[in-house]
C-alpha cells in the first residue's frame, strides 16, 4: 500500500472478507446463521462493500453456552499467561495495521490517518494489558482482632458483553476486551450495526492467535445485530452476562442502565460528550486554533470527545474568530483515503439529516452564522454524506447547544472572567472532556481543581482529545461515569473479595463482642 493508494478489493482479500460473511464467531470458528443478510455500504462513495449474515437467536444462545464453559477454564489460567495471548494479539494487529486501518476508514468514513491511529490504539492497549496482567494487585490490611490478618483480592466477573459504537469501530472493543481478558473474563462483542465489517475483520485477525494457542471456543466471541437491535436487547436482559460495557449516545445509555439495572447487573457506560475549550486571553492562539479545528472536524465531528463549544475571552474574541474562519477556509473535504483531505463524510444519510436539523434549530433559536454549513454535492460526494463544517455564535442556554449533535458544528461563546468560563463549560448535562488554552499557571491550576472542570478528562494546552492509553477514559454526569483503557479501570472488570484469616486457637470477635457457650 505505497502512499496509501488503496484498492479496497485487495484490502478485503487481505483481511479474509468475502462477498457474504458470517457475523457470528465463537473465537476460532465461524457460525452459519439463518439471520438476515445485510448489505454494508461505504459512506465514502456509497458503494457496496460486502454483506453480513446477522446473528440469529439460536446462535446467540450457542455463543452464551460456549462462553460459560470457556470462562470456567480461562479464569484458571494464570494472569501472565493470559497476558501472553494478548501480547500475540497485539503482534497480529501490527501485521494487519495498514489493511485494518484502511477498512475502518472506508467503512466508517474517518481519515486514513485516523483509521491507522485507531488500530495503533488497539496495539497500545494490548501492550498496556500485558503489563497489567502482572499487576492485578489487592491490599493487605491489619485486623483489630489478634492473630488475624485481612486482605482483599480481585476475581474475574465472568462474561463481559461489549457494545461498541460506529465512530471507533474497533478501538473501543480493544479497550474493553484486552483488559477484560487479562482479568480472566471472557468477552462477547456486539459491534455497531453500522460498522460490522471492521469487527469481523478484527475477529478473523485474532482468531489466528486462538488457533495457534488452542484457546477454547467462547473466550472471545462476536455477534452482529440488525437495526431492530434484537440481539442487543438479548444481551441487556441476559443474566449470564455479568458486565455490559456500552459505548454510544446518552439516550442509548439510559436504556442500557435501566434494562441491566432491573436484573441488578453491572454496567460500564461511555456516552455523549458536549466538550468545550476555554480560550484564555493568555493563550498561544496558534496552538489554540489548531487544537480547536482538529477537535471540531476530526472524524467529521463524530467523536464523543469532539470539540462542540469554544468559550473565548472577550479581549481576543474577534481576533480568534477571524483566525478560526481563515483556518476553516483551508479545510479539505473529500475521500478520507486520500491523505491530503482533512475531513471525510458523516456515517450515513440519517446523520446528515440530524446535522441539517441542528442547523435549522440553531437559526431558529437565534444563533449567528459565522461559517456556513450545508451538504456537498457532485461526483466526489456522490454518497450524499459529505457536509461542510459550520460555526455559529450562540448562547450556552440554547437547547441545541445543550444537546450533543454528532456532526462538525462548532459553537462560539464569549466570556469575561475565568469563573464565568468554567461555569459555562460545566453548564451542560454531559461531562466527558474539556480543555483550557492558557500560559497562566494560576488559570490552568484553577481549571484542574475541584472548583474547575467537572469532566472526566481535563486538558491544558491540548484539545478535547481522549485520554491516552494508560489514562482512564470516561466522563461524569450524562456521560455515564464509566472508565476504560487505563489507570485502575481494570477493577470494573473484576469482583472484589475481602478475606479475613484467623491463625489463632481462639475466636475473638470484632468490636470486643463476647459470645461464650
Image: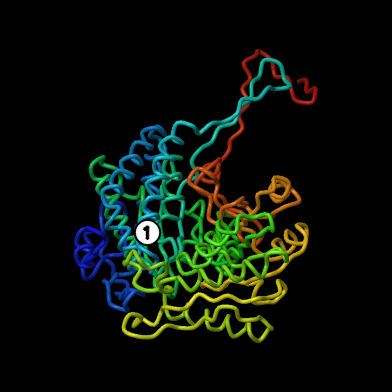
Above or below 110: residue 148: above
Above or below 441: residue 154: above
Above or below 301: residue 151: above
The image position of residue 332, as x and y in percent, is: 41, 71
The image position of residue 148, as x and y in percent, is: 66, 19
Is 512 left, or right, of 479 in this rendering? right
Q: Residue at x 56, y 40 (%)?
A: 488
Q: Is residue 221 visible?
A: yes
- Tag 1, which secondary structure? helix
Residue receiving disc 1: 113
Q: Is residue 56 visible?
A: no
Dot 1 alpha-carbon crowd within 10 angstroms: few under 14, some 14 to 19, many 20 or more: some
The image position of residue 359, as x and y in percent, is: 57, 82
From the image, which quarter does the C terminus lie in? top right
Determine the image quadrant of residue 211. Answer: top left
Determine the image quadrant of residue 249. Answer: bottom right
Q: Residue at x 56, y 60 (%)?
A: 260
Q: How many marks?
A: 1
The image position of residue 407, as x and y in percent, is: 51, 73
Near-viewer residue (37 or 462): 462
Q: Residue at x 37, y 50 (%)?
A: 120
Near-viewer residue (199 or 375): 375
Colouring mode (rainbow / by chain / secondary structure / one colour) = rainbow
Amino acid at each position: 500500500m505505497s502512499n496509501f493508494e488503496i484498492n479496497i478489493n485487495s484490502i478485503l482479500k487481505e483481511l479474509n472478507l468475502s462477498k457474504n460473511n458470517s457475523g457470528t464467531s465463537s473465537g476460532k470458528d465461524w457460525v452459519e446463521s439463518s439471520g438476515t443478510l445485510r448489505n454494508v455500504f461505504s459512506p465514502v462513495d456509497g458503494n457496496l462493500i460486502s454483506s453480513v449474515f446477522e446473528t440469529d437467536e439460536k446462535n446467540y444462545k450457542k455463543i452464551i453456552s460456549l462462553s460459560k464453559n470457556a470462562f470456567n477454564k480461562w479464569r484458571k489460567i494464570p494472569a501472565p499467561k493470559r497476558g501472553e495471548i494478548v501480547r500475540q494479539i497485539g503482534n497480529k494487529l501490527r501485521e494487519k495495521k495498514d489493511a485494518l486501518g484502511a477498512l475502518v476508514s472506508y467503512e466508517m468514513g474517518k481519515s486514513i490517518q485516523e483509521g491507522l491511529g485507531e488500530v495503533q490504539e488497539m496495539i497500545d492497549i494490548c501492550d498496556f494489558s500485558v503489563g497489567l496482567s502482572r499487576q492485578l494487585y489487592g491490599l493487605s490490611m491489619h485486623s483489630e482482632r489478634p492473630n488475624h490478618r485481612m486482605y482483599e483480592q480481585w476475581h474475574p466477573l465472568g462474561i463481559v458483553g461489549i457494545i461498541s459504537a460506529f465512530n471507533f469501530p474497533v478501538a473501543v472493543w480493544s479497550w474493553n476486551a484486552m483488559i477484560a481478558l487479562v482479568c480472566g473474563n471472557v468477552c462477547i462483542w456486539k459491534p455497531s450495526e453500522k460498522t460490522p465489517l471492521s469487527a469481523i475483520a478484527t475477529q478473523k485477525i485474532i482468531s489466528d492467535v486462538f488457533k495457534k494457542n488452542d484457546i477454547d471456543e467462547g473466550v472471545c466471541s462476536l455477534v452482529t445485530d440488525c437495526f431492530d437491535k434484537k440481539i442487543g436487547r438479548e444481551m441487556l436482559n441476559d443474566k449470564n452476562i455479568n458486565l455490559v460495557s456500552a459505548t454510544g449516545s446518552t439516550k442509548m445509555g439510559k436504556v442500557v442502565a435501566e434494562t441491566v439495572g432491573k436484573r441488578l447487573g453491572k454496567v460500564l457506560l461511555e456516552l455523549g460528550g458536549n466538550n468545550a475549550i476555554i480560550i484564555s486571553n493568555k493563550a498561544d492562539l496558534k496552538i489554540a486554533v489548531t487544537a480547536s479545528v482538529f477537535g471540531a472536524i476530526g472524524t467529521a465531528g463524530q467523536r464523543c470527545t469532539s470539540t462542540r463549544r469554544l468559550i473565548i475571552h472577550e479581549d481576543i474574541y474577534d481576533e480568534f474568530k477571524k483566525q478560526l474562519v481563515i483556518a476553516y477556509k483551508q479545510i479539505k473535504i473529500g475521500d478520507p483515503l486520500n491523505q491530503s483531505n482533512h475531513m471525510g463524510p458523516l456515517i450515513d444519510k440519517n446523520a446528515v439529516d440530524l446535522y441539517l436539523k441542528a442547523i435549522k434549530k440553531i437559526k431558529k433559536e437565534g444563533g449567528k452564522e459565522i461559517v456556513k454549513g450545508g451538504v456537498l454535492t457532485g461526483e466526489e460526494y456522490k454518497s450524499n454524506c459529505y457536509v461542510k463544517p459550520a460555526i455559529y455564535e450562540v448562547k450556552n442556554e440554547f437547547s441545541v447547544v445543550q444537546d450533543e449533535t454528532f456532526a462538525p458544528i462548532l459553537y462560539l461563546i464569549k466570556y469575561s472572567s475565568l469563573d464565568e468560563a468554567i461555569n459555562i463549560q460545566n453548564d451542560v448535562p454531559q461531562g466527558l472532556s474539556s480543555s483550557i488554552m492558557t500560559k497562566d499557571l494560576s488559570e490552568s491550576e484553577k481549571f484542574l481543581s475541584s472548583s474547575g472542570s467537572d469532566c472526566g478528562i481535563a486538558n491544558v494546552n491540548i484539545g478535547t482529545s481522549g485520554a491516552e492509553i494508560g489514562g482512564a477514559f470516561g466522563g461524569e454526569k450524562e456521560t455515564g461515569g464509566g472508565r476504560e483503557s487505563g489507570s485502575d479501570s481494570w477493577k470494573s472488570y473484576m469482583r472484589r473479595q475481602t478475606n479475613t484469616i484467623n491463625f489463632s486457637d481462639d475466636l475473638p470477635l470484632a468490636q470486643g463482642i463476647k459470645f461464650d457457650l
